Image: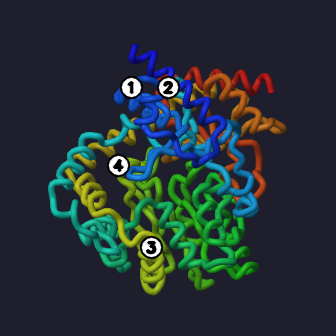
Amino acid sequence: MSQDSTERIIAGLRGWIASAPAGARVPSNRALTAEYGASPVTVQKAMRRLVALGLIESRPGVGTFVRAVRVAGPVDYGWQTGALGAPPTRTSVLSSTQRTVAPDAIGLHSGYPAVEMLPERLVRQALARAARTEIALTRAPAAGMPELQAWFAAELGASSPAGVVPASARDALIISGSQSGLSSIFRAVVGQGRPLLIESPTYWGAMLAAEQAGVVLVPIPSGSRGPDPDDVERAFAQTGARAFYAQPTFANPTGAQWPASTSHAVLETVRRHGAFLIEDDWAHDLGIDGEPHPIAAVDDDGHVVYLRSLTKSVSPALRVAAVIARGPARERILADRAAESMYVSGLLQAAALDVVTQPGWRTHLRGFREQLRSRRDLMVSCLARSAPLTTLETMPAGGLNLWVRLPEGVDVVQVVRDCELRGLIVAPGSEWFPAEPSGPYLRLNYASADPSRFAEAAGILGSVLEAS
């Protein structure tokens, strides 16, 4: 009987609310008790239901009132287009590498290695230890924890030859991931409206950071052995650029590594023009067939601004990286980072330092590289067998990706869509070009998906290309 009374009150009040203006006062509970012959408890239950339905609102100490009810329908956000203006060409959408996909899909689009390849035990233990210290409750220095600064500097200094003054702990700035470092470097070293030389293809996040900093990109073609040093020389002379962003070691997306001759020639060109080389050593820990040889290790006069991240080899959850720079450039980058985010979480810094100074860290890196090798080789063999229309122009010496060329005339966007319809997620190569793509490419991450599904993935790609 109580339930029937509640529904009767709700039905009656809904009819009254439909004809009442927004803001009209609802009869008191005492009046409703009398009108419907119901108990106060039943009336209160009915009122709570109406509040939950969004039809009325209670204002303590004042009363209960009819809410303004909007007719359900598509929400129009068109006004925001006028308020925001024309969208930037790259920041208007997420990169394909940042997409979340269905659990059963084969994801070869990601920019990270699979969780099972990371040092899970070391990371969990390090976070637990850091959480028990005072660092969990205190602010970190703007430039970073001195111990972590010293570690990054020592890592770079280990590659410095005799006669070169190695980087010091003070030269290192701890940042929250390499992406934030790129933004600060471009603002502080290049400047809005100024040209920046950049490899083509290159890391899409660098193009995004440059766009946000208002930097004008000047593409330099880069192949399996990096850019032609003569092209770099010519671009500096023609544009008056003050910086060149590059990935000399296991470049994203191609996996290429510059030979020593190219590194030396580019560094000399940078020095001759009184400019900077912004060296992104994102894959320092991801070597397969080669070891990293940072150009910054042979520079002691401040021409190289060096960037190294631990995100790919330690954990994406520990977004810790470092910029190593000398002189006024270092101070300007620090000022920009302090204005942007003040400081990096000391908890994350302490955990990252804990991981990379544990005896198990080097053991992890050896196993990590072997896993990268086996995954890379397996995917290459699967593509050769089941997707023969693809071409691998460079066997990557390190990193996480294969840079695969498709047949001329193929619609890459349509290939990506058709693959997705069959459960395979791949990244279109156009995202890695700062200008028009030099050909139809896909970037395939061999470190993120289950390798037992590589053959299936290659089969899907092969059948899509044959049908194109």
Residue drawn at x 34%, y 28% as measured from the top left: 41
- The residue identified by callout 2 is 9
Question: Is 325 in front, or is 180?
Answer: 180
Say the numbered circle drawn on residue 183: none
For the residue labelled by badge 1, is the local secondary structure a helix, a strand or a loop? Answer: helix
Q: Position of residue 154 (x, y in %)?
A: 30, 68
Q: Is residue 440 visible?
A: yes
Say the numbered circle drawn on residue 337: 3
Q: Depth-wise, is mark 3 or mark 4 nearer the camera?
A: 3
- The residue identified by callout 1 is 42
Locate the N terminus and report the quarter of the image it occupies.
top left
Locate the C terminus and report the quarter of the image it occupies.
top right
Q: Is residue 313 visible?
A: no
For the residue labelled by badge 2, is the local secondary structure a helix, a strand or a loop? Answer: helix
Which badge, 2 or 4, comes first in the chain's sequence?
2
**Above or below, comparing residue 320 to residue 460 in the picture:** below
Residue drawn at x 60%, y 33% as measured from the top left: 16
Residue drawn at x 75%, y 61% as measured from the top left: 82
Question: Is 372 in front, or is 36?
Answer: 36
Separation of residues labelled 2 and 4 (CA atoms)? 61 Å
**Above or below, comparing residue 401 to residue 196 in the picture:** above
Which badge, 3 or 2, comes first in the chain's sequence?
2
Q: Are marks 3 and 4 in contact (CB under 8 Å)?
A: no
Q: Depth-wise, is mark 2 or mark 4 nearer the camera?
A: 2
Q: Depth-wise, is mark 3 or mark 2 nearer the camera?
A: 2
For the residue labelled by badge 4, is the local secondary structure a helix, a strand or a loop? Answer: loop
Q: Position of residue 283 (x, y in %)?
A: 46, 53
Q: Are marks 2 and 1 in contact (CB under 8 Å)?
A: yes
- The residue identified by callout 4 is 314
**Above or below, comparing residue 130 to residue 115 in the picture:** below
